[in-house]
Image (tube, grey):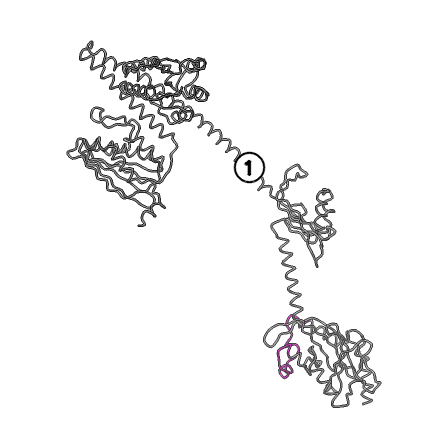
Amino acid sequence: MRACPPILLVEDNPQDVDLTLRAFQRRKLANPILVAWDGEEALAWIPRWEAGETLPAVILLDLRLPRIDGLTVLRTLKTHAALRRIPVVVLTTSKEDHDIQSAYDLGANSYIVKPVDFNNFMDVAQQIELYWCALNKVEK
Amino acid sequence: MNSCKSEIRAGIGRQFPDRIPWQPHYHDRNESIFPQVRFKIRGSLYLLAVFEEMKNIYLAPGSANHCSTRAYNHNTKEGESRFQTAFEYATVGISIVSPEGRWLRVNRKLCAILGYTQDELMALTFRDVTYPDDLKKDSDNTRHLLGGEVSTFSMEKRYIRKDGGVIWANLQVSLVRKADNTPDYFISVIEDIQRRKKAEIALQESREQLKLFIEYAPAALAMVDHEMRYLACSQCWRSDYGLHGRDLLGVSHYEIFPEISEEWKAIHRRCLAGETIRAEEDRFVRADGSVQWLRWEVRPWYQGGAISGIAMFAEDITSRKHSELVLQQLNIDLEERIANRTAELKALNQSLEGFVYSVSHDLKAPLRGIEGYSRLLEEDYTDRLDDEGRLFVRNIRTGVRRMNELIDDLLAYSRMERRHLESAVLDLSMLVKQEIEGFREEIAANGVEIIADLPPLLVNGDRDGLAMALRNLLENAIKFSRHAAHPRIEFGFVHDDEYITLWIRDNGIGFDMKYSERIFELFERLHRQETYPGTGIGLALIRKAVHRMGGEIRAQSTPGEGATFHLRLPRALEKTATVMEP
């Protein structure tokens, strides 16, 4: 059995990062979690993946990010010949139609609104883990 | 007979000194010498001879050089009757009139012209049948004739027919004198010229009309001949070109306007060659520098198929053009203002969108932190908190939930304000059924009786907006009738040609009608959070959605007796008609 591929969390809010880590921890998630604190850091992973580093099982992407916003990160990933098959789940606060449509138009694999209620958030974390890390077989 | 001959000869010599048009003529080559007069009828020369005391009158075509009675032997009965016939059936009216004016002999044609029988006419004088206005001239002429001043006269005059009608005739009169030179009788030839005269009058009238028409035309009009000489022009033309009081007839256009441009001369030449040239609007700078706008046209006019000159038309459209330009400028200004306003609104809208974006993204993040950490505190540190501490944490989390609901509802309201509505034909009764289905659990839990027996109700509206409105109304009805002994929610409708009004009635707590408007305002609430929780946004959201669909919502209630909400929406007319058919 190969080592579990990581999950890349792109999130600038430390509390959100902390709560997300805790939610995954409580659900006993096996995948290691990498954090990119803004869009720039997220895109900095691209050369490393191109160089052969293990691809993430899923990228959890916030839209509202400093420096480079989430939609730009999404567009860059989804237009990258080799990396466009990495599942990207937009995990954000906005319910605005405009945001949802833009995300799907750019190729987001899923769009999840972060629930305020922590219990609900833990449910979401579990679903993400189940669907994107355990069930979903990404082409290598 | 011979003595008679010489008498006649002498008489004729006296009577007809003029040769034209009444040319006395006699000859005795075959012993038939009688006074003869020549006269012209419609350009042809005729001979008239009267002899044997007017018993015989001779009329025959003749010529200036050759006329003769030779062919007719007056001594024979046959000859007499032929002369008689010629007189009687002549195509002109002929009469012999006494010096006093009495008719002595009249022919058939004259009777026909005047509409009398011979006997009737013989009983009258020429004065009786002469049109009063022409009588004096006729009498004067006759007097001159009797006085020997003239030997003959001819005039155009009017006669009054027996039927009262007035006719124009050409009268030629000659006087025959006796041997002693006293007047014997008049010979009058009367030609009916009514048709010619009518045509002349009509022509004159139409000329007058045309002249008036041109003169008073409310446009500058002028007609010139081939040499550009004026034939006619309107008063407008004179006033427009400062030609008041000048007699333009026969004067050349170029003489009046010596400074006229070569361009115009070229246009005139082209039109004289058969072209019609016009301009809908043409700008001219006048001598004083002011600008004049003209609409003009120059076209040839024809006579007998050939170009005889040109007609010129010009209309000063300066004031109209000025108004147009002003209007155009106003439109440009207006468009600019609209563009500016649109840009302002767009900017405003963008800042609003930015605001909403911030709210939806940023406002909830700290809330999530508070919620998450208070939850962790409650779960992981519950043993280190006392009862009061745990109550505080719960209160924090209740506040967070409320804040979350508020933000959600506010964003929903803002979305409703900004989103593009899809207008579709929707069946209200179907939407009601769906929403009832969505509340099945609450309805069952609260034991609510639902009465919603609706026929298809087709309206024009936005599906999501309408579903949201119905959902909120139903939610309210359930919420506020929860404490009734037997909660009941009833749906019904009324309609007219334009609208369908759906009503939803509950038997809940109701409200005072003084709040019937306020409840639709944002954040307006009538109850405490503990009894009936809510954000105070629901009804405002409904009204926003319904207004945007062209509908209305209003509420009716008596405290303690439930509330009724009336939702009025534009009816989908065509579809309704097809639904009504079986």
Seen as rendered, the residue at the extreme right is: B29
Name the one closer to the observer, B315 or B442. B442
Q: Amino acid at mark 1?
A: Val
Tell me the element at label 1.
Answer: helix
Can residue B439 be seen from the camera position used here?
yes
Can residue B352 be seen from the camera position used here?
no
Instruction: Report the residue marked by disc 1.
Output: B326
Seen as rendered, the residue at the extreme top is: B384
Name the one closer to the observer, B265 or B429. B429
Tell me the magenta residue range: B112-136
Q: Residue at x 64, y 79 (%)?
A: B111
> In the image, residue B148 lies at what x, y percent?
77, 76
Name the one closer to the observer, B354 or B45. B354
> In the image, residue B21 lies at what x, y percent?
77, 74
> In the image, residue A104 lies at what x, y percent?
40, 26
Q: Answer left or right for B387 relative to B24.
A: left
Q: Is residue B120 magenta?
A: yes
Q: Answer left or right for B308 relative to B209.
A: right
> In the image, residue B57 lies at what x, y percent?
73, 84
Residue A93's place in the image compared with B552, above or below, is above
Residue B254's place in the image compared with B400, above or below, is below
